[in-house]
Image: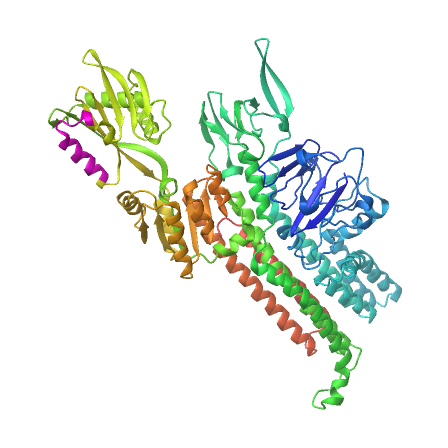
Amino acid sequence: MNAGIMRGEGRLGLGFVSGGLGLRVGSSRRVSVSRRRGLVVRAHGGAGIWNEPQRRAQEKKQVLVGGGNGHCHENGHSHENGHSHENGHSHENGRSHENGHSHENGNGHHNHDCCSDEDDYLSATTHCGGSTAVQIDPEGSTWTKAIGTILNLRNRVDVSLACGLCVVLAPILKLLAVPILATNVLYGIVLVLCGVPSSIATIQALSKGESGVDSLMTIAALASYGTGAYFEGGLLLVLFTLSHAAEHAITDKAKSDLDAIRDLAPEKTFRMRTVNSKEVVEEILVDNVQVGDRLLVKASEILPCDGVLHSESAYVNLSHITGESTPRSVSAGDEVPAGAKPLDTSIVVEVLRTGAESTLSRIVRLVTEARTNRPKLQSFIDLFGKRYSQIVLLLSAAIGALLPFLHHVLPIFPSIGLFGPGGSLSRSLGVLIASSPCALVIGAPVAYLSALSVCARKGVLVKGGAKTLERTGTVDHVVFDKTGTLTTGNLKLIGVQVFSGAEEEKSSSKLRSWALSTAAALEQHAVHPIASALQEEIQVRGIHAGDVAEARSFPGRGLEGTVKRHGKQTAVRIGKPSFVEEWISEHSDLVDRSIAASTERGEIVAVLATEDGFRAVLSFNDVVRENAKSAVSSMRSDSLRLSMLSGDNMTSAKRVSKEVGTLDDVHASLSPSEKLDILSDWRGSKASVLMVGDGVNDAPALAGATVGCSLGLRSATAVENSDVVFMDENLSSLSWYIRKSKSTRAIVVQNLVLALGFMALTSMSAAFGAVPLWLAVTIHEGGTLLVGLNGLRLLSDDLS
């Protein structure tokens, strides 16, 4: 399989055409699928990712950035509808389109030193040398395969260890008076296996006018060989290669959960059709599925599209989407998201959404976007690194050339020779090695990538990537919407008062049952939270819906029909008090007092009345999420300011605030623009504000917050304006995410302090000759590994 690779406008784009699933997700919200053997994802021109199904049965390999059949378009856009060039057509020498430069003869970006701004941040910056891992293309040119094989040596731990053994044996053989040729052969093996790959990568970088960590380390190692310091040069090459391979393994570990989400998309599915009165099951490509199709999904297989369950009932596993460990029970008529996996039985699902609008595709798009966002801190480090590398080269050269003459200018300084262990060249190399910012470069990306990976595993999709993690780490004020956020958005019936004549019928359960039965019958075809609450209540109480005829709706007011009462048909209404007031005018003070009392408690009221004088007041509450109180308590213990912005009345808002633990600020009866105004005022006072919402009316505030969070994927508008999406709609995940972000920020700072400390201490010691060259090498590479492992701690769920 050949691949064309491009980088443009800070994005990484890959196009594969030798067979593969091509999944393109762009701003048009469509998915284009070409059924071959690979997976290509486009998210707003974002990072390209791929997967071969065969990869599951093979040793994991990496991407060869070479020429051939898979050219990409400018800015990472692939062909519409997964189209690829047929008949092996490709660009000359593996070149892709403008701004998407691959290299002549299929050579790729194996050495974007210190992580160029053009690289996919989370897949490239984690390697000290910024080099891309390599897959050998069996159809490529001999030159392409040779270069790929050589460059891939830097990612192999076994090669590093073998060369390390050579470096250890060489001085031992020298002590045993073995001929010098034997030790030179061992050092030569190290130079070939470790030095040649690094040299090729450095030449590629320098030919583009770039100099970075790879360049500094390679120059230092070759200079050591050139001055006869074979042991130090070999040790540097071995430790640098081993560090590179370890960083590669660390990155793969950190990215594994993100990659697992993208690997979910199935290639084929089974469609059920009726042919000559018989049910026929046929296997089809997922890109041929249409809305309305019935799909048969076998146990342990993945549902490729959102749909409605036609089977009786089943348990489905959504852990890879929502992070829920407990299987979810679904029944006929329930909506089942793409990515669901039935556990113990096959299910039949009628397709509701395909392509980019399915849950799975939206998750893939969000995860892909997360991989392309660079935090401000990392952008500064990259810019600093480019200039810094040039300064280090000049400083090291100055130390090597000028130090022997310093005694003649300033006699107070001791005389220092050019050669030898304490000579100026040795000190120059020590400074060059110790000052190389490997640990500085790897410190932030590994931490961010580890945090993003564990977030994805827990069903927290950080759409804004590392930028969002960085901003969330500064949050000191959390703002909630009420309905659908602190509450479930589902109403629950909490009271029924019936009135007959001038008195309330307090003891008549029969009348209450009749009121519920009639109300449920009127509302049974309505799409409204009150209707759902009534249907749920009669099921719990074992009451059947009554017989209501001629039911009709009055939008925004209520419903009306006829019902049999006392042996004759009478008109009945349910809805707002104003809708039924003409039938409750007699003795209306009782009903009015009941309505007023419910309203004062923040309850929602519906009135049922018949034309012959029966009246009932039904009270409903928006149910507070069961984990809202514990989540609020957790965030309060972290010294966060907690507020509510609600469109509901103040009474209802204060009731919810009290139930979850009394928030610091409660603002009610707000329009979307008023929510945004209040939030802007808070941000204007230097607060870092995180807003949580779930609906269209929250979109302006979500977009205006420092960090916007959405519960679930129910509202496309809310998701579009959010930085973080909580797939399990669990507020406990919010408090966990905030803590994880703050932990990430702390570890990034730790890594930067460690890196700068190692660099400063070792550089000064090397300049003054206090540290031998081999020890400077060991400290430098050890510091890089220490920083990488410290960032990897964030993969733990418990570290939050």
Seen in the picture, residue 404 relative to 103 is either above or below; the reply is: below
Q: Is residue 800 visible?
A: no
Find the residue positioned furthest to the top. Answer: 276
In the orientation shown, which residue stands out farthest toward the left? 502
Residue 735 lies, in percent from the top left, at 42, 49
- Please state if 784 lies on the left or on the right of 90 as rendered: left
With respect to residue 741, does 15 lie above or below?
Answer: above
Toward which corner of the image does residue 684 lie, by quadrant? Answer: bottom left
Image quarter of the N terminus: top right
Q: Would you say 151 lies left or right of 590 here?
A: right
Residue 588 is inside the magenta segment: yes
Residue under the point 62% across and 46% down: 46
Q: Quadrant of residue 575?
A: top left
Magenta segment boundaries in residue numbering: 582-599
The image shows residue 59 at horizontal and vertical percentages of 71, 41
Does the image show residue 735? yes
Closer to the camera in the image, 517 or 247: 517
Report the predominant secondary structure element of the magenta stretch. Answer: helix
Q: Nearer the viewer, residue 282 or 58?
A: 282
**Relative image position of residue 107 (x, y in whole percent):** 79, 50
Residue 788 part of the magenta segment: no
Q: Residue at x 46, y 47 (%)?
A: 709
Give the left or right position of residue 24, taking residue 142 as reference: left
How far from the left and from the top, in percent, is residue 677? 39, 53
